[in-house]
Image (tube, coloured by chain):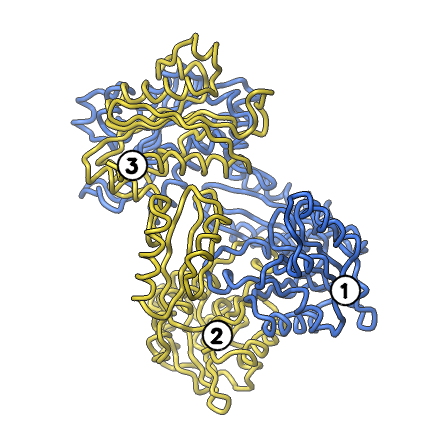
Chain colours: A yellow, B blue
Amino acid sequence: MKVSIVITGSEFVYGIKEEKNSRYIAQKCLERGLDVNGIGIVGDNLYNLQYYIKMALDKSDIVILSGGLGATEDDLTREAISEAIGVPLIYHKDWLERLKKYYHKKGESIDERRKSMAKIPYGAVIVENPIGRAVGFIKVLEDVNKVIVALPGVPSEMKVMLEIVFEKLNLKEKRRKISIVRTFGLTELEVDSIFRNINIKGEYILNTSPKGVDIFLIDNLEENLKIKEKILKDRLKKYIYAFGNVEMEEVVGKLLREKGLTLATAESSTGGLISSRVINVPGSSAYMKGGIVAYSNEIKEKILGVKEEILKKFGAVSEETAKEMVLGVRKLFNTDIALSDTGIAGPTGATPTKPLGLHYIGFYNNGVVEVHKVIQKGERNDKRLYISQYGLNLIRLSLTES
Amino acid sequence: MKVSIVITGSEFVYGIKEEKNSRYIAQKCLERGLDVNGIGIVGDNLYNLQYYIKMALDKSDIVILSGGLGATEDDLTREAISEAIGVPLIYHKDWLERLKKYYHKKGESIDERRKSMAKIPYGAVIVENPIGRAVGFIKVLEDVNKVIVALPGVPSEMKVMLEIVFEKLNLKEKRRKISIVRTFGLTELEVDSIFRNINIKGEYILNTSPKGVDIFLIDNLEENLKIKEKILKDRLKKYIYAFGNVEMEEVVGKLLREKGLTLATAESSTGGLISSRVINVPGSSAYMKGGIVAYSNEIKEKILGVKEEILKKFGAVSEETAKEMVLGVRKLFNTDIALSDTGIAGPTGATPTKPLGLHYIGFYNNGVVEVHKVIQKGERNDKRLYISQYGLNLIRLSLTES
């Protein structure tokens, strides 16, 4: 079955506010085996909205709307649906009662606009809103065998209500399964050429970011996905850091916890990003002792004990400094494992011998230090994210090899 | 003039990849005084895409497409436009020559699909792609006085080419001005009620995040915006941390730099997020010395010198610990200013007397320590972002008061 999604809100059409509901609804539809035809984002304008709804109905079996069900003058979704399908709006008595009680309890009056939150097209079935005031609804257009669904724009309300909608629609579609395989260390082209070689059937989508290349496998059968995952595992081996929507810091955290190891970081270029990512994982206090953000040379010397002559001879961005930093922080925090980085994130700071994007990443584990040289192009913060991912990946690789 | 934006890519319609181009184009259109009617996001399907283009043309004076101009089989934008407007595609000779030279130089052959990147509708004007291979184009439909613009989906290419398009279109529209006023410390309701009281005319949009409430003012006249900004400044005073698209860490950085002051951080709950944000600002090495991420009590004691009896008596999440931390880090780094935080970000760690979300933020400036108690609800990382914003805001307030 084909689905169109229509989102309303002038803030989105102006590009002022980030619109996230459409992506969420699209993903849920994909999982349910529903084909999303298209997504329309429309301002709070009755004529436009009504036009988009008509067009969406023309192209799809199900139209899911989000937004415009509140009590302000900008909330036009009910009216637009009513006009688009030529069905009048009526009050849903029970919901109206609930609204009256709610406002009465708060000691407030209920005006026409507030009352409108109980309005639905004649013949529609309500979708209760367990969190907010605006009621959602499902309207079946029997003559054309199509369905319109209206949900609020508040993400938390929309999300619970969307599940209720899927239940009520009692979809017979085969659920489509999606599997995410996350890789680090290969380019998108490399991953893609591996795909073409192993000739995996069915859909896949690649998504590249500073965190690596994510592979989205799509199939109707769970077992097919498992087979594909297995093939990828055999081919991509250590490049895969996670199956599923899991972050590198979670993978690393799990390994550290299982092995009872502790971690400390000495960050210059990433400035606390690595420690911040590690600590984002609930339960990280079991293995994360902390870190030093040594942005100035003074602190590299004074706190991490990087020797003055090393900083003078090789510079702050050097293999030698990265090594001293990681040894220094590991000594200070007395951990099993330590990471360090130093680099030129830009926009300035490059020299003839040290280009923009040059980074050294130091890694200590069990008495051994490795230093990796990386030159990474791109935007300042993308570089940092890449370096943090690179560093965390070093921990992962060393703990899965042993 | 009315604009519709059409984005193509199955990855967006599946909700797998975050779609960012539409928001960018919408913002640029708004600044240029163009009214965006709606945004359509369509999968890589010739029929659907063509349908969306037709519909967009029906509703708008200008249709801007992004994506689907590459050399793979999924790239269908050229064909879809050709079908939608009934105009054949032809090769743009000069661009085709450029492509041939490019691939020749790389020692690669140029097949039909690669050649297709030089195809444009008959009568269209090309928009040169200064970064990539796919050419963009502008096709004027003279009989209906409408314009179709096709740009690649790669954000960096789309962005430069969009500017070229605006130049070529030679728009006579009055540019609309947008002004962003960023506040911290007020709720959206509070900001909104202030607005209603001062009765500012014209459009505004509020956007709330852990970083605060942003006010977007929209007006045709720069001077009107200036007046509104002035009124807001008088009313909201210190709650405003920036005019324009500026981050708190930039504001703080500018203040520290101007006053020649240095900063260090001692982070527990935020785990390096504050230092990472400070260091994200180019030139931050002038004032940022670094920081300690003291996630474990051991490190709070050993490196920051928080007394054992304080940790025992009051706990790690306490006013006393936050104070000791900030004093410790400021001593260690010998800075003018220091920040510390300690808290329960969750999901576990709450006690009967210390609820989830409880944080203490320590602030040192010129011999004086303040500790702020904050209880913040929400998702783990939203809490951290809020706390980091709160901490940075303390620096801002103290440096603008003096």
Amino acid type, mark 3: Gly
Which chain contains the residue that carries disc 1? B
Which chain contains the residue that carries disc 3? B
In the image, A27 versus A14, the foreground residue is A27
In the image: residue B182, left or right of residue B300: right
Report the residue marked by disc 1.
B90
Amino acid type, mark 2: Val
Is residue B266 something one can see in this rendering?
Answer: no
Q: In percent of the image, x 31 and y 61: which residue is there? A: A227
Q: In percent of the image, x 48 and y 80: which residue is there? A: A61
Name the front one of labels 2 and 3: 2
Q: In percent of the image, x 76 and y 60: which residue is there? A: B138
In the image, residue A253 sits, relative to residue B145, either above or below, namely above
Q: Quadrant of residue B297?
A: top left
Q: What kind of element bears circle 3? A: strand
In the image, B283 versus A341, the foreground residue is A341
Query: Do badges 2 and 3 share one subunit?
Result: no
Badge 1: residue crowd in 10 Å (few <14, some 14–19, many ≥20): some
Q: What kind of element bears circle 1? A: strand
In the image, A53 versus A290, the foreground residue is A290
Which chain contains the residue that carries disc 2? A
Residue B160 image point, x, y percent: 68, 47
Is residue A59 something one can see in this rendering?
Answer: yes
Q: What kind of element bears circle 2? A: strand
Report the residue marked by disc 2.
A3
Report the residue marked by disc 3.
B343
In the image: residue B155, left or right of residue B185: right
